[in-house]
Amino acid sequence: MSISSNIETAARYIREGKLVAFPTETVYGLGANALDPLAVAKIFELKERPSFDPLIIHIADLAWLEELVMGADERIFRLAEKFWPGPLTMVLPKSKRVPDIVTSGLSTVGIRMPANDYALGLIRACGCPVAAPSANKFGRISPTTAAHVKKQLPDVDYILDGGKTTVGIESTIIKLTEHGFQILRNGIITQEELEEVVPLDSHSEIEKLSAPGMMKSHYSPRKKLLIADSVSMKTDKSKAGLISFSGELENGNRKVIRVSEKGDLRDYAVNIFEAMHAFEDDDDIEIMIAEPVSETGIGKAIMDRLRKAEYNWRQI
Ligand code: TXA
Ligand code: MG
C-alpha cells in the first residue's frame, strides 16, 4: 500500500481493477471502477461489508447520470444544478449498465458528484464512474484523513491523500418518489434547502428495503461513547474524553476536544469523526462523552451520527 497525492497513479490503479481510497468533501471513500463487478466485489471484501448494503456511485460529469439512470427527469437536473458538485446523493432507478453487485440487487442506484478536486480529478482521469462507500471497516468510524483510512484499511492498494475533508460527515441521501423527495440519511444539505427545489414527500412511508443503510448502530468507536445526559454525567470523568460544542460541560474531564470555536454546527460536522478517532487512539481515555445539539437543520445529521455511534454502548 502507498499513500501519495498522485491522481494519475491512483487512476491507473482504478483502471486495473484495484481499490483506491480517495478524499471527497464529506469523508474518504474506498473506490473501484463501478462498471467492473470484480473490482466492486473487492470493496465488500476489504470493508467486511455485508453484500446487502449498496454502494454510491461517484461521477464527475452529468453525462454519466443519463448512462447510469433510467428515465432521468427534470427534477434530478434541477437538484444537480443547485447541489452538485456537493454532498447530496440521489437514489434513482438504475439502468442496465450498473452491475447488480453495486446496488445489492436493488432496482435503484445512489449517485453523487463530489465537490473535491482530487475526487473529480481521479474520476475524470480513470474515465469511469467510481463506486465508493466510506473508507472504514463496516460499522466503524468514518475517515476524514488519509491516516484514518490507513488505520482501518492498511491493505488498500493506494490512498490518494488530499488532506482533511472539509464537510466531515457523509452526504445527505434522498430518494425521489412521484410526490417528491424522502430523506434516507441526513447530512449538511438540509430538508429545508432541498424543499426550495423539490417538495418533500410526506405521503409515502420510507420503504424499509429502500434504505438498507439505515441501521441503528453505525460509526461505532471501539471505546465506549455516550451522548452527554444525566446518566453519562455520573460516570468517572477522570478517564473521560469530552467532545465539546458549547464549552459548558468541560469541567472535570480528563481531556476535551472543542469541535467549534464559535458554536457553528458545520464545525461540529467537520470535526466529529476526527474527535472520535483521536479519543479512540488515546490510551488516557476509556470513555468518550459527546455533547448533544438541538435537532434542527444540520443538528439532525449530527445527532444521527452520535446516536448510531452510541447505540451499542448504551445497551451495555
Ligand atoms: O458522503 C458520502 O456519501 C460518502 C462519500 C465517500 O461519498 N459515501 C458514503 O457511502 O457514505 P456509504 O456506503 O458509507 O453510505 C452510503 C449509504 C449506505 O448506507 C447505503 O445503504 C445507502 O447509502 N445506499 C446506497 N445505495 C442505495 C440505494 N440504491 N437505496 C437506498 N440506500 C442506498
Ligand atoms: Mg459509511
Image (spheres, rainbow, N blue to C red):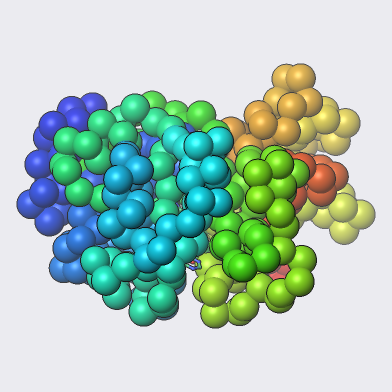
User: In the rendering, at what x and y percent does residue 229 appear?
Assistant: 87, 52
Q: Is residue 307 left or right of residue 9?
A: right
Q: Outermost residue toward the front?
A: 74
**Residue shown at the point (49%, 61%) measured from the top left:** 91
Relative to the observer, which residue lies in front, 121 or 241? 121
Q: In this view, does 250 lie to the left or right of 183?
A: right
User: In the rendering, at what x and y percent does residue 147 appear?
Assistant: 37, 37
Relative to the observer, which residue lies in front, 59 or 269? 59
**Residue shown at the point (29%, 49%) measured from the top left:** 64
Q: In this view, does 215 lie above or below 276?
A: below
Q: Outermost residue toward the top?
A: 262
**Residue shown at the point (57%, 62%) measured from the top left:** 176
Q: Is residue 41 above or below residue 31?
A: below
Residue 29 visible: yes
Q: Is residue 226 above or below residue 48?
A: above
The quadrant in which the C terminus is found is: bottom right
Q: In this view, does 128 lie to the left or right of 71?
A: left
Residue 109 visible: no
